[in-house]
Amino acid sequence: MAGKEPVIITDKEEMRKWTRTMRSKNHTIGFVPTMGYLHDGHLSLVQEAQKHTDLIVVSIYVNPGQFSPNEDLSTYPSDFQGDIQKLKSVANGVDVVFHPKNLYDYGNSEMGLIRSAENEGLKVVSCVEDKGMGHETWVRVENLEKGLCGKSRPVFFRGVATIVTKLFNIVEPDVAVFGKKDYQQWRIIQRMVRDLDFGIKVIGSDIVREHDGLAMSSRNVKLSPADRQKALSISRALSKAKVESEKGQVNCGELINSAIQTIDEAGGRVDYAEIVEQESLEPVETIKRPVVFCVAAWFGKVRLVDNMEINI
Amino acid sequence: MAGKEPVIITDKEEMRKWTRTMRSKNHTIGFVPTMGYLHDGHLSLVQEAQKHTDLIVVSIYVNPGQFSPNEDLSTYPSDFQGDIQKLKSVANGVDVVFHPKNLYDYGNSEMGLIRSAENEGLKVVSCVEDKGMGHETWVRVENLEKGLCGKSRPVFFRGVATIVTKLFNIVEPDVAVFGKKDYQQWRIIQRMVRDLDFGIKVIGSDIVREHDGLAMSSRNVKLSPADRQKALSISRALSKAKVESEKGQVNCGELINSAIQTIDEAGGRVDYAEIVEQESLEPVETIKRPVVFCVAAWFGKVRLVDNMEINI
């Protein structure tokens, strides 16, 4: 079973043609978009997709549209051959790895490129504009993109929604799977698919953790051994809050303060710690219905996110 | 040949299913999105689409997302039965009329509705937000949407790009035809399709004019007889500029002033008169390559747009 060699497609027209050919033969296509440097969390998304469709496409593409010029695009880890080996290790494997070079380069398009100077007046600038690429169409989920990670990463969700739209239009899948580790991203894509009437079913897949509780992330490799140890404080803080709320603590302020203290004491720097409604992502003061506790924190130069659903 | 009765589809899932069934039988689908109250200009778009695909879908939907609350959504003319008769009059007719009730109402979606109050902080508000609909995902073509009509209608192109994305995702056509009468709209859709990687070919179709030169528009019916007469000044001004430029006048300032004078003297009120590059829509001072002269002007309470390409 294991060991299936995926077809590697780099051209978007070829990718779309593959899907259309397969669909005409009554196959269904599951899609897992990734930025590569795969870990067991990504592989669990593939396994989830396999439950829904008979063919699987994984994309590997580091999206400059979701990084601002001062973020870590240039140091984002990559290991394409390692990724292919990992995908081959999954039972039943994947059928296609879509690995485009630059999805914002429209080549000798008759419409030409926009000079980056023309974008100077814009408040929101990602690496796409910064590098003077001619792309100028952006998808925004205007309410959900504002809170949590949106506060400290103003271009992030605009870039995510846009690249996912592009990938959906190229891959044309029936089902797409996103990890709940990036909870806000998952909710934003779910809302976008509803609002823009994509004919695609979006599935959220549970967080996969290391044996010691750290949520799997491609960025974990950038942690020093000491920071890796400190970073355990996030999942510890979230688990503690979950237990406390299950014991009857419904005051979000107290739960949050306790979590911040746990991470602070371990040597982390909290970016945000918020308890929000699971769908609107609006902050709540008192837990009365299902919520999710979302945290982002810095350990050294690495920013990690994690979350835990509290379904009382 | 004439007289084919189109299938009328109101449900978006049914619409998508129709396309997918037809595509699996190797048909190709051409799409003409309209807001109804059809005239010969719309019918020419159908005829253009027929050149490219064997099946034709026309949508009739007045899009609240492209009107601001102070614009003429409530008085936009409609005549659904008349529209069907007109579509039947086209040789070979159309196959489907997609006529949804409300494309921003997601019913008892688990994600619920957003209260309009939550949108108060937003600068851009269309009738969709004004009526408290839960939709919050918008597509923007950030540079092209700024000039010309974008200056006086700040929600317009955001609404157009978004509804066209929704319709593309529902109808899933191979080809879509837009009228060059709405020149900026056509260029915006063309750019959006490129930037978001839609697998759709966009075709711009020439303006259709009344025998006296007035560009056909659903809004023409709202003109009083006197204003209808005054409105001829737009096409007269554009034709004159085209002739003058062909005779060697390359100074855009002089061409524009002359056009404004023509419209002013007829009793119109110019919103804008600009000579711009055909693709970037950037204003030009001296005509050195193909340009388009775009005009918007008020006659009474009716705002009309028109344009003329100057291909020197």
Image (cartoon, coloured by chain):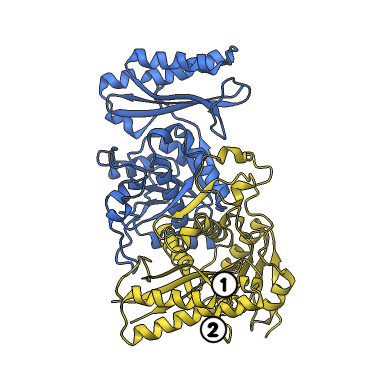
Chain colours: A yellow, B blue
- The x and y percentages for residue A48 are 53, 79
Q: Residue at x 58, y 87 (%)?
A: A211
Q: Residue at x 30, y 61 (%)?
A: B113
Q: Is residue A279 visible?
A: yes
| Residue A27 - label | 1
Camera-side residue of A269 and B196? A269
Asked if labels 2 and 1 touch by Cβ distance under 8 angstroms, the answer is no
Q: Is residue A207 visible?
A: no
Is the N terminus of chain B in the top left, top right, bottom left or bottom right quadrant?
A: top left
Q: Residue at x 39, y 74 (%)?
A: A256
- The x and y percentages for residue A102 are 66, 54
- The x and y percentages for residue B166 are 43, 54
- What separation in Å lies between label 1 and label 2 (alpha carbons)? 38 Å
Chain bearing mark 2: A
* The quadrant where residue A11 appears: bottom right
Element assignment for label 2: loop
Camera-side residue of A298 and B192? A298
Camera-side residue of A3 and B227? A3
* The quadrant where residue A169 appears: bottom right
Say which residue label 2 marks: A213
Chain bearing mark 1: A
Q: Residues within 10 Å of mark 1 (few under 14, many from 20)?
A: some
Q: Looking at the image, is mark 1 or mark 2 earlier in the sequence?
A: 1
Element assignment for label 1: loop
Query: Identity of the amino acid at label 2?
Result: Gly
Query: Identity of the amino acid at label 1?
Result: His
Up-down: is A174 above or below A16? below
Q: Is residue A182 shown left or right of residue B311?
A: left
- The x and y percentages for residue A44 are 57, 79
